[in-house]
Amino acid sequence: MQLTPYLNFDGNCAEAFAFYAQLFGGNIVYQGTFGEMPAHEGMPPLPEAAKQRIMHVHLQIKDQSLMGSDAMPGADASCGGYQRAQGLWVSIQADNTADGKRFFDALAEGGQTVMPFAQTFWSQGFGMARDRFGTPWMVNVRQG
């Protein structure tokens, strides 16, 4: 079994996943827009503003995945509309302090530093930031 974070965005999913692919050294194995979805019976018309939004993206990073999509524009948060992530953090376990600092600095740039990257009693490096796309991240350096 593998647990896979699924991130939601408000129209900037493609930009975010291009950034994540470059930062984490992964490959986007699938990316499709709402406009590319095949129509089916009973499907309501797709708003023009939604056609270029990402319906689903799958980023493969070695043996792990990160997935995401854009929300429907104008939709209520209880019915597929965008809602900023709360009550969770995507946690990265970096192999060394240099990688941890690089990940943290890139994720924090243009976003919000919640806890600066620094040595803690449990790790050589730990920090928390919300990136410029609104995703909350924890970066932790593995021990041993």
Image: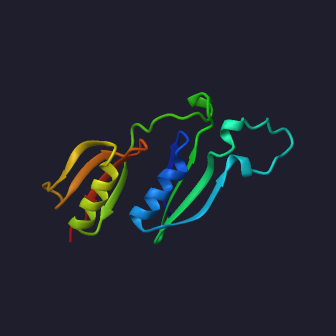
Image side of residue 110 versus residue 26, left or right: left
Position of residue 37 relative to residue 25, above or below, is above
Residue furthest right in the image: 41
Residue 77, image x, y percentages: 56, 30
Image side of residue 133 versus residue 129, left or right? right
Q: Residue at x 22, y 54 (%)?
A: 126
- Quarter-wise, where is residue 32 in the image? bottom right
How many numbered callouts?
0
Colour convention of the picture: rainbow
Occupied quadrant, residue 48: top right
Question: Which residue does the image show at 39% across and 38% down from the upper left?
Answer: 87
Q: Residue at x 47, y 51 (%)?
A: 16
Q: Position of residue 58 (x, y in %)?
A: 56, 59
Residue 14 appears at what percent x and percent y?
54, 52
Residue 65, relative to residue 55: is it above or below? Answer: below
Question: In the image, is 12 to the left or to the right of 132?
Answer: right
Residue 44 figure quarter: top right
The picture places residue 125, in percent across and down from the top left corner, at: 19, 58
Residue in the foreground of this view, choosing between 124 and 29:
29
Q: Is residue 4 visible?
A: no
Whether residue 111 is situated above or below residue 94 in the rendered picture: above
Where, quadrant-wise, is the C terminus in this rendering?
bottom left
Q: Residue at x 50, y 51 (%)?
A: 15
Residue 144 in view here: yes
